[in-house]
Amino acid sequence: MINKIEELKKEIESLKADSAEAAEQLRIKYLSKKGILSQLFDEFKTIPNEQKREVGQALNSLKTFVKEKINELKESFDNKGDEGPDMDLTLPGTSFELGGRHPLSIVRNEIIDIFARLGFTVSEGPEIEDDWHVFTALNFPEEHPARDMQDTFFIAQGPDVLLRTHTSSVQVREMEKTKPPIRAIFPGRVFRNEAISARAHCIFHQVEGLYIDENVSFADLKQTLLYFAKEMFGQDTKIRLRPSYFPFTEPSAEMDISCSLCGGKGCNVCKYTGWVEILGCGMVDPNVLENNNIDNKKYTGFAFGMGIERITMLRYQIKDIRLFFENDVRFLKQFKSVD
Ligand code: PHE
């Protein structure tokens, strides 16, 4: 019996468990009521009296040994969490290639920065709009062609729900939200039911500007836009304002800049005129102020709206507007600003 105990001791010494579950199985095998140790104690009762002392001691010490061993195995799993992560934190990490910003985002952020330097804040409005914010509040006559199905994507009719065709709708939302003085720009996506070509797309981006206060004049508008043009396209840039028409501004103008590619000498981008159109603008029509409960005797204002695609195409000499929406990485990779 002593031999048997010795052998068991060796067996137990080399026990291993690869999970808490396996350690529990070992406890059952050795220490449960029907386990190996219990059987040995039963056997112990049958051995001659003169051997009982020696065998009894060996048996008791074996029992303590098994208990300790199994506890040790179990604890090795209980303590797993305290031992820290089983990975090497000193290994160098996996590096990821950093993406660049989309060129439209780069230019939009630049526009925001330039106007921020003049004290303009930034607001946004919804892309899905109603007739009031896109047309009626902006003084569009009842039968104005811009309301036509051909230009506007309608979602529902009567009452009309539509995709905004310009960011001027956010002018109205800003006037509802705040009292003058208002000095803010509104970047955003706009939608027009137009055939897609190298120069036009049915989805594009605009930045709208609105400035309302006492004594705001056309000279303020002109100076603000001249500052913008020089910051955006270089200090040598000249501007020119041509009379135009928008229902929500009076007088209205379109602004050209001297061609940033040929410096005004004439090239195929400016169609050999030396000038390229970049935005629409004007003094806020008094009717628009009235529609938005702003005292048009006390306040005047100016507004402008520009297409971000247009400006980005001029900035980077991009010839086809569709490139902005195709997301071909070979195109996008060329614009690396990540801030
Ligand atoms: N909303 C006009 C457009 O989309 C641009 C504009 C904005 C003109 C503000 C004047 C004042 O063409």
Image (cartoon, helix red, strand yellow):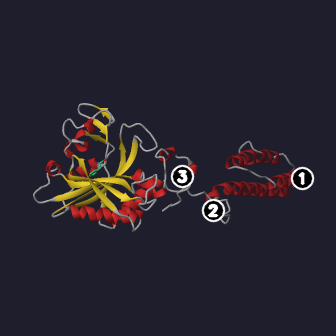
Q: Which mark is residue 332?
A: 3
Of the numbered discs 2 and 3, the one sitting upstream in the chain is: 2
Callout 3 crowding tier (Cα within 10 Å): few <14, some 14–19, many ≥20: some
- Where residue 269 appears, as percent x and y from the top left, is 45, 52
- Where residue 258 appears, as percent x and y from the top left, is 38, 60
Task: Judge by depth and name the residue closer to the eye, 143 or 97.
Answer: 143
Q: Residue at x 69, y 47 (%)?
A: 24
Residue 126: tell me if it is visible.
yes
Label 3 element class: helix
Toward which corner of the image does residue 133 lie, by quadrant? top left
Instruction: Give the residue at mark 1.
Output: 3
Q: Are marks 3 and 1 in contact (CB under 8 Å)?
A: no
Q: Are marks 2 and 3 in contact (CB under 8 Å)?
A: no
Q: Residue at x 58, y 50 (%)?
A: 330
Q: Residue at x 24, y 39 (%)?
A: 131
Label 1 element class: helix
- Where residue 114 appears, as percent x and y from the top left, is 36, 64
Gap between marks 2 and 3, in whole Å? 42 Å
Q: Residue at x 71, y 47 (%)?
A: 22
Residue type, mark 3 in image: Leu
Of the numbered discs 3 and 1, the one sitting upstream in the chain is: 1
Callout 2 crowding tier (Cα within 10 Å): few <14, some 14–19, many ≥20: few
Residue type, mark 1 in image: Asn
Circle nearer the viewer, 1 or 2: 2
Residue 221 vertical position relative to residue 46 in the rendered view, above or below: below
Q: Which mark is residue 84?
A: 2
